[in-house]
Structure formats: C-alpha cells, structure tokens
Image (cartoon, helix red, strand yellow):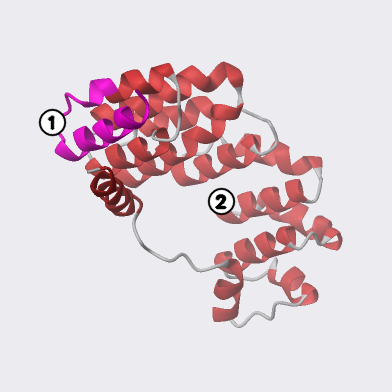
C-alpha cells in the first residue's frame, strides 16, 4: 500500500507540475543565432529581440561577467519586463546593489509571473518583501497558472521565521480550497516533506476533501507522520 501511495503521489505531482521541457538560455540564444562568447552576449543585450536581451542577461549573470555590469544596468529600463528582471538578477549575482533595488521595484508590476520571479529572487538575498504579493496571487488571481506558480514559490519564504506559519497557511489553503486540482496537488507536494503541527492539521483537514486524490495524499502523509 505504501508503494502504491508513493506512486500515486509521484503521478499526481507530475500532473500538477506538467512535463514540459523549458529551453535553457543557451538554447534560446543559439536558436536566434547568437554566439555564446562573452562579446557576443554583451552585444546581445542591445538586440531588437526581447528574448535575446533577456537570455543574454541571464547567461552573463551565470558566468559572472563583471565587465557586463554597465550594459546590464542600462537594461534595467528595458521596455520588456523579463529583460529588466533578468538584468536585475544578473546584477545581483555580480554583487551590484542596483539589482536588488530593481527587483523590489518589480514587485509593483501587474504581470504576475514577473512579480513572482522578482519576489523569489529577492528571497535569495534574504529579502522577504515580496511575500504578501505572492500570497495574494496564490489565492486571488483568476489565472490558474499564476496561482500555481505562486503556490510553488511560497515555500521559499519558509527561511524567514516570522513568515513560517503564514506560508504554511497559504499553501494549505490552496491544497484544501483551490478550485483547480493541479494547484491542490502542487500545494500538497510543497507540504508533504514538512514535519510541523500546522502541516499535520492541514492534512487531517484534507481527509475530508471532496478530492479523492487529496484524501489519499493526506493518508500517505499522516501515515508517515503519526
């Protein structure tokens, strides 16, 4: 039975998260004909293609190319929000303080995935200022994929002790009450490895769920955490 429940859980989470392969920045740039040398990547920051600018910024940050800082700073005013945020993330990785400031400003945007990206990146700097907006998206957005992405981002805030209870409450709410099963399953996946009394209470409540898969996952969690 335990093995069956484990398989069920794996399939449920795979369904919730999807099985789409996201192209890497290098793959995107190669598809656009951009060489992956440092000079080419720096030149790509001024490309007319927003996807090229975005992914060039990501690669330059990943490669810690400090010589790219001046051009990355220019990209902070790009009209394409994801290029701006990619530049901010790259600057953060390069130790430039303008990156964090740009990410905080990104929390004020109207594009939910971009806001979630900014908030998630800020958590890596020990900055929890994006928590409230991510929690709000997880419960209030009319877009299923926005809520799903927010639910998957919420556990990043568990590193902040004053946010722990609120984070668990927000994810548990998604597991118990979201109208879309993909989000309920993803929320259960985020909670299943947390050994906390409030998580146990959430799974006890999930035993009453109208969703049979959630009930099975609750039984699996409670069986492991008696």
The answer to which of 13 and 123 lies nearer the viewer is 13
| Residue labelled with disc 2 | 81
| Residue labelled with disc 1 | 210
Q: Is residue 220 magenta?
A: yes
Does 222 appear above or below 27?
above
- In magenta, the rendered stretch is 204-226
- Occupied quadrant, residue 121: top right
Residue depicted at 28% across the width and 51% down the height: 7
Image location (x, y in percent) of residue 119 = 57, 37
Question: Within 10 Å of the Cα at label 2, are there few (<14), some (14-19), or many (20+) other Cα atoms?
Answer: some
In this rendering, the label closer to the viewer, 1 or 2: 1
Q: Is residue 22 magenta?
A: no
Residue depicted at 85% across the width and 58% down the height: 66
For marks 1 and 2, the one nearer the N-term is 2
- Occupied quadrant, residue 128: top right
Image location (x, y in percent) of residue 13 = 33, 48
Residue depicted at 65% across the width and 71% down the height: 47
């Amino acid at each position: 039975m335990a093995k069956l429940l484990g398989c069920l859980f794996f399939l449920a989470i795979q369904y919730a998260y999807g099985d789409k392969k996201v192209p890497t920045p290098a793959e995107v740039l190669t598809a656009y004909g951009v060489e992956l040398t440092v000079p080419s990547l720096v030149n790509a920051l001024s490309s007319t293609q927003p996807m090229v600018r975005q992914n060039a910024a990501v690669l330059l940050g990943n490669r810690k190319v400090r010589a790219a800082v001046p051009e990355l700073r220019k990209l902070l005013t790009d009209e394409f929000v994801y290029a701006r945020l990619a530049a901010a993330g790259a600057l953060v990785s390069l130790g430039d303080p303008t990156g964090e400031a740009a990410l905080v400003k990104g929390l004020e945007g109207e594009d939910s995935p971009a806001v979630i990206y900014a908030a998630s990146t800020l958590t890596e700097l020990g900055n929890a200022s994006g928590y409230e907006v991510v929690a709000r998206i997880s419960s209030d957005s009319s877009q299923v994929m926005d809520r799903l992405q927010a639910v998957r981002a919420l556990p990043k805030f568990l590193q902040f002790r004053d946010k722990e209870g609120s984070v668990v409450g927000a994810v548990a709410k998604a597991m118990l009450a979201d109208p879309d099963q993909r989000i309920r399953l993803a929320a259960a996946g985020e909670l299943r490895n947390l050994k906390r009394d409030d998580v146990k209470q959430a799974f006890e409540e999930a035993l009453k769920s109208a969703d049979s898969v959630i009930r099975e996952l609750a039984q699996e969690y409670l069986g492991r955490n008696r």
